Image (tube, rainbow, N blue to C red):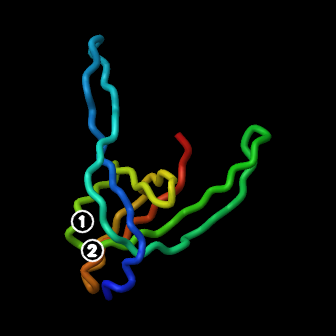
């Protein structure tokens, strides 16, 4: 991959499980790293759920092969949170292709 294509800065947050005083697991997200990525529009749709309109948007984030990312991580891009759907290692270009969908907290 040409490094000039990595135009956008993304932040990756890693899932951390903590025990509460009552013995329950509490899931929080801690900042893991910040890296540059190429961002492609993957798909988008409009759905109606319980008489509310939702706009589902999927993106494709392409990062370098050395970025430590797992499928339970959260990506922050363009002031939105993105849940990872799949991770694919592209051996030909030494890239990682991450497909993610936007979600609300």
Q: Residue lying furthest right in this view? A: 51
Disc 1, disc 2: CB below 8 Å? yes
Above or below for 15 versus 5: above
Q: Residue at x 43, y 55 (%)?
A: 76
Element type at mark 2: strand
Q: Position of residue 8 (x, y in %)?
A: 42, 71
For residue 67, which numbered disc appears in the image? 1
Left or right placement of residue 66 versus residue 57 in this view:
left
| Image location of residue 2, percent across then percent down | 32, 88
User: Does residue 96 appear left or right of residue 41 in this picture?
Assistant: left
At a point 24% along the width and 65% down the height, the residue shown is 67
Q: Image check: 7 left or right of 23?
A: right
Please report the residue visible at 48 percent of the width from the left and 51 percent of the height from the top: 81
Residue designated by label 2: 64
Mark 1–mark 2 distance (CA, rounded to whole Å)? 6 Å
- Density class for disc 1 (Cα within 10 Å; few <14, some 14-19, many ≥20) is some
Vertical side of 3 occupied by 62: above or below = above
**What's the mark number on residue 9?**
none
Left or right of 53? Residue 66 is: left
Helix, strand or loop at mark 1: loop
How many neighbours does mark 2 have within 10 angstroms: few (below 14), some (14-19), or many (20 or more)? many
Q: Nearer the viewer, residue 17 or 88?
A: 17
Q: Residue at x 36, y 57 (%)?
A: 11
Relative image position of residue 55 (x, y in whole percent): 67, 55
Quadrant (top left/top right/bottom left/bottom right) for the N terminus? bottom left
Q: Residue furthest left?
A: 66
How many labels sit on residues? Answer: 2
Q: Is residue 26 above or below residue 104?
A: above
Residue 45 vs residue 1, the one in the foreground: 1
Residue 25, x across and y down, in percent = 31, 25
């Amino acid at each position: 991959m040409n490094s000039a294509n990595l135009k956008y800065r993304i932040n990756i947050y890693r899932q951390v499980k903590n025990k509460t005083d009552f013995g329950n697991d509490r899931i929080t997200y801690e900042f893991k790293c910040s890296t540059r990525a190429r961002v492609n529009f993957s798909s988008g749709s409009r759905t109606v759920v319980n008489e509310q309109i939702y706009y589902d948007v999927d993106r494709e984030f392409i990062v370098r092969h050395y970025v430590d990312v797992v499928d339970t991580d959260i990506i922050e891009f363009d002031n939105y949170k993105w849940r990872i759907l799949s991770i694919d290692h592209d051996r030909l270009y030494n890239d990682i292709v991450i497909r993610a969908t936007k979600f609300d907290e």
